[in-house]
Amino acid sequence: MGITKEKIELLHTQIAGAKKIVITAHKSPDGDSIGSSLGLYHYLKQINPNVVICHPDKAPYFLHWMPGFDQIISLEESGQLVEDSFKSADLIFCLDYNSSSRIGTMEKPLVASNAFKVMIDHHREPDENFCDLMFSDITSCSTAQLIYEIIAESNHLDKIIKESAQCLYTGIVTDTGSFRFSSTLPKTHRIAADLLSRNINHSEIHENTYDTNSLDRIKLVSFALLEKLVVLGQYQTAYISLTAKEQERFNATKGDTEGLVNQALAIQGVRMAVFMKESDGIVKMSFRSKGKIPVSEMAKNNFSGGGHLNAAGGKFVGNMENAIQKFVTILPKFVEENKSLF
Ligand code: 5GP
Ligand code: MN
């Protein structure tokens, strides 16, 4: 699953011979999926210019500043272009997702394509059946870090131009919670240091990503914390829920609730947190935990999802009331089964 000389060689044979390379990443883009897509894009461009990025949907506004963002084609906005790109692709990169089901309706053209497929990902339990070459490291803090390592193993560090460095750095920062999560290793800092040495402005990156909130977003978050946060002390668990109507009240746009779940987790004594967000008859569940509490199991076993040990997601088909009901019903058993970890 890791990076070997043979795999690097095979990868470069494919890159060199490709007439059309398509970079894909998961639905509901985050800093790592956009950062790794663009970081890889700027790198590949120097070896083989026939490369495009196709994503299922558009990223939240706080990632639009990233260099090359305008080049990303989304299925949501340019369906035909995406379909055509898949049809002509002979090499497809699958970044930051472990199963074709994570790319929404883009799954169909991906699975139908005969292109050589390369997975670069760090999510648990990767599906071994949909890619021809897999770089999967579940201990990696981010896909961006993995891409850096692949480039390093290719002896191509000189090909990480400033734009690539900005994007990879953003992927690492966002997926490590600004170097906080336990997935942050000494090598993560070494890689970040190398990226910083490429003339990039890290405070500008942080500012662009984290300090560009709309007033509506601040009010939505304030409302959620004041009115919608529930702490279940007995289970060291907290949850926040937002119905579609509540989101409408604050003109919520994509990304406005990003990171909200971490605020619930940041409460003293809380070991597990959930954020539930309703839209179109589906409640999207976001789980976070401290220590070794496996929220990926909670997501996988109860909400058709998955992810990482401490950060996972899934969904509930139905309304908010029933989603909350389901969660609080299964919670006691989950806490009991993981008693030693709480
Ligand atoms: P978030 O809560 O930020 O949406 O997602 C947290 C983590 O769980 C991310 O790494 C994400 O890729 C993963 N994740 C989120 N939603 C799903 C889902 O529906 N299915 C799976 N398998 N993983 C998910
Ligand atoms: Mn990631």
Image (tube, helix red, strand yellow):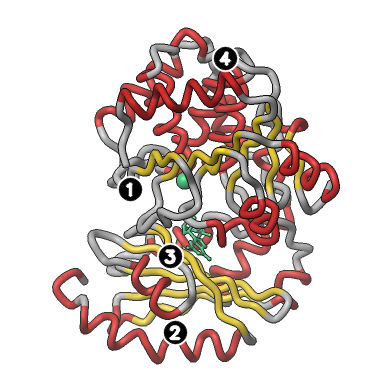
Count of numbered labels shown in the rendering = 4
Residue 237, quarter of picture: bottom left
Label 3 vs label 1: CA separation? 13 Å
Of residues 38 and 53, the one nearer the viewer is: 53
Q: Amino acid at mark 3?
A: Gly
Write down the residue under mark 3: 306
Write down the residue under mark 1: 138
Residue 254, quarter of picture: bottom right
Q: Which mark is residue 327?
A: 2
Q: Residues within 10 Å of mark 4 (few under 14, many from 20)?
A: some
Query: SS for tag 1?
Result: loop
Image quadrant holding the N terminus, namely top left
Q: Nearer the viewer, mark 2 or mark 1?
A: 1
Which badge, 4 or 2, comes first in the chain's sequence?
4
Give the vertical position of 25 relative to 235 (above or below): above
Label 4 vs label 2: CA separation? 45 Å
Q: Tell me: 101 left or right of 245.
A: left
Q: Tell me: 130 left or right of 104.
A: left
Which badge, 3 or 2, comes first in the chain's sequence?
3
Q: Are marks 3 and 2 in contact (CB under 8 Å)?
A: no
Q: Amino acid at mark 2?
A: Phe
